[in-house]
Amino acid sequence: MEASAEDPRTAPAGRGCVDSELGLSDRRRKREEKNHLHDFQNLSTQVDIESPDEAALRDFSANLFAEMGPACLDFLVAKPSGLLRDECLRLAAGEWASADPVLALEWISKKTQGPIQTAAAEEAMYVWANADPTAAARWLVAVLPADNKLVAALVKGWSEIDPIAALDWVQMKTSSVNRNELQMQVVISSPPESHQEVATALLLKAGDRWRNNPAVHYLLRSWIARSPAKADEWMRSNQAGAEFSEQVNFGLDAPEPMGE
């Protein structure tokens, strides 16, 4: 009698081993997912759901990504929506973006929607811009130039490492409608030690319209509060800064932005 294809006596060498390994791999994957689910459930009992500790969530998301890779986002997105799940998903998206931002952003676009899509995409863009702002800006201009929230996330991440380059990009690549708001983002995100350089660049860009620019006002007020002597010395050497400084020193409120 002719042996069937499944007859172990005629099966190709190693067939049984391959099937066994595939079964073992599948069981291992399911066991790991069960363990991660247990960890996620434990996390929900350890943090304040209404106001979770971001450091704890960041550690959990980083560890989850280290163990599962991008599959951890599929694991998280399958869980019921809620503040804890959404925050972990957002942070895991940032972990993925540190390794492959384009794939992370494409996954977010395809697999999520609504507020969590916005939050995860902003986190991914922020992480990318904080590491390689030029590449992030080039991708954003080519793919989603009208997404104002992603533009703001780009500027935030970029400003933390190179606020002057971020200011230049805002000046050249964004519309005048959003420019003041993005310049404000640069000011808020820039390191304190860069305030003098940022102030100089802002005044150069604003010119005679500095009174209409809230970013200039915010920066100068912050600088006065942080380093009054240095700020005052710099402002007196700049015409716009001198006007601002004189009104502050005379006890008057600095000029507010005027209407268009």
Image (cartoon, rainbow, N blue to C red):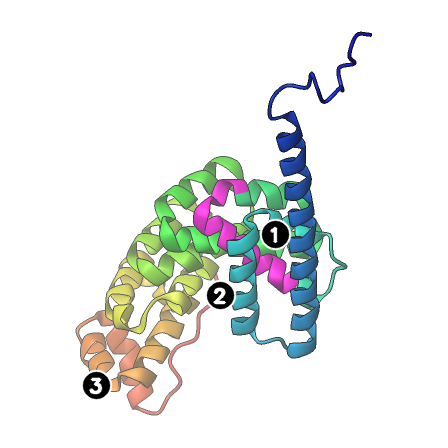
| Front residue of 111 and 134 | 111
**Residue 183: percent from the left, percent from the top?**
41, 60
From which residue to which does the magenta span run?
86-103
Task: Please rate how many residues cluster around mark 1, counting C-alpha atoms within 10 Å: few if below 14, some from 14 to 19, many from 20.
Answer: many
Disc 1 to disc 3, how far (Cα)? 51 Å
Q: Can you see residue 85?
A: yes
Q: Which mark is residue 259?
A: 2
Looking at the rendering, in which quadrant would you find the N terminus?
A: top right
**Residue 193: percent from the left, percent from the top?**
26, 72
Secondary structure at numbered mark 3 = helix
Q: Nearer the viewer, mark 1 or mark 2?
A: 1
Would you name the residue on which mark 1 appears? Answer: 72
> What residue appears at the point 29 percent right and 64 percent down from the top-left corner?
198
Task: Please rate how many residues cluster around mark 2, counting C-alpha atoms within 10 Å: few if below 14, some from 14 to 19, many from 20.
Answer: few
Q: Quick check: is 74 in the magenta stretch?
A: no
> What residue appears at the point 33 percent right and 85 percent down from the top-left corner?
225
